[in-house]
Amino acid sequence: MSLPRTLAALLLGVALLRAHPEIEEALTRLSTAIAAQPGNAELYLQRGELYSRHEDWVSAEANFLLAAELSPRLPRLAQARGALELAAGRPAAAVSLLDTALALDPADTAALVLRARAHRALHAPAAALSDLDAAIARLAQPPPELFIERAGLLPPAEAIRSLDEGIARLGPVVTLYLRAVALEESLGRIDDAATRLLHLAATSERPEGWHKRRGDLLARAGRATEARTAYTAALAAIAALPEWLRTSPDTARLAAELTDLAAPRP
């Protein structure tokens, strides 16, 4: 027979505190403040968020429900509860709570992103895409991950345009470039993918790895002569390194591999 829910939560909480003493300090501070102000819904919200960050879902939910009883329209509460439902694998409940959060604050970009993820979990890509579009448009500096998430909802050609929008707004973020390279290759756009890798090599302090990636891409496309040229460029980049870097074990192993790859084949 399973443990009662409250006992399971207690045991989980004890294990959590033992693993993270800094959480115990924060919880002690919040519990002391709650004892002094038992009607302060914000304090329960903060304690619930703390539990949620450390995946103690039961304790988090209990604190959020206490906050909701005291102040149903408390800012951030519906968003926090929606995030909890999503993390706990209940995306439909998450959407309902995040709808409430956005009704209370239509500019809540965090709620938009969370609702997009909940829609995606519910296999509703159009709704997820709409929320991500809105979040990206409202954020002055969207994190690269949002462009990558949006790209995952789009056909490859449109996904590349989404990633290029991210690059235009954020600069040459490596994760955006690499996702675009993979998509370009999947569409057979080898020259475009190779050009992206060449740009990364040109802007990197350690270009040899990007030249090798470019060579590997060209080799997969059956363009052996161009691949060897890229591998030779990688060797030249290694030769230009300071001696302490050039002779390090990892660099020496890479140079040996490149030497073999760049060698003419009969």
Image (spheres, helix red, strand yellow):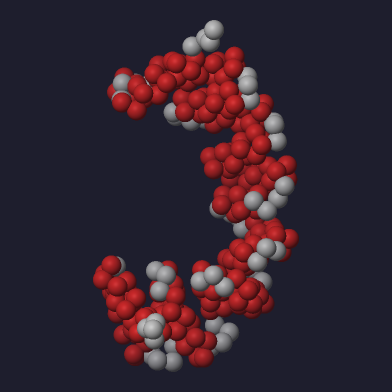
The residue nearer to you, when weighing 57 against 67, is 57
- Please tell me in which quadrant of the rendered image residue 223 appears: top right
Give the residue drawn at x 58%, y 84%.
73
Left/right of residue 10 with respect to residue 157 in the rendered view: left
Vertical order, 139 against 224 (above or below): below
| Res 169 seen here | no
Vertical order, 159 against 11 (above or below): above
Left/right of residue 25 with respect to residue 47 in the rendered view: left
The residue nearer to you, when weighing 246 against 46, is 246
Give the residue drawn at x 52%, y 9%.
264
Give the residue drawn at x 54%, y 74%.
85
On the image, the x and y values in percent for residue 183 come to: 65, 39
Left/right of residue 205 with respect to residue 179 in the rendered view: left
On the image, the x and y values in percent for residue 218 come to: 60, 24
The residue nearer to you, when weighing 127 against 7, is 7
On the image, the x and y values in percent for residue 12 come to: 34, 76
| Res 87 seen here | yes
Left/right of residue 248 with respect to residue 152 in the rendered view: left
Which quadrant of the rendered structure holds the N terminus?
bottom left
Residue found farthest to the front: 1
| Tally of marks | 0
Vertical order, 63 against 15 (above or below): below
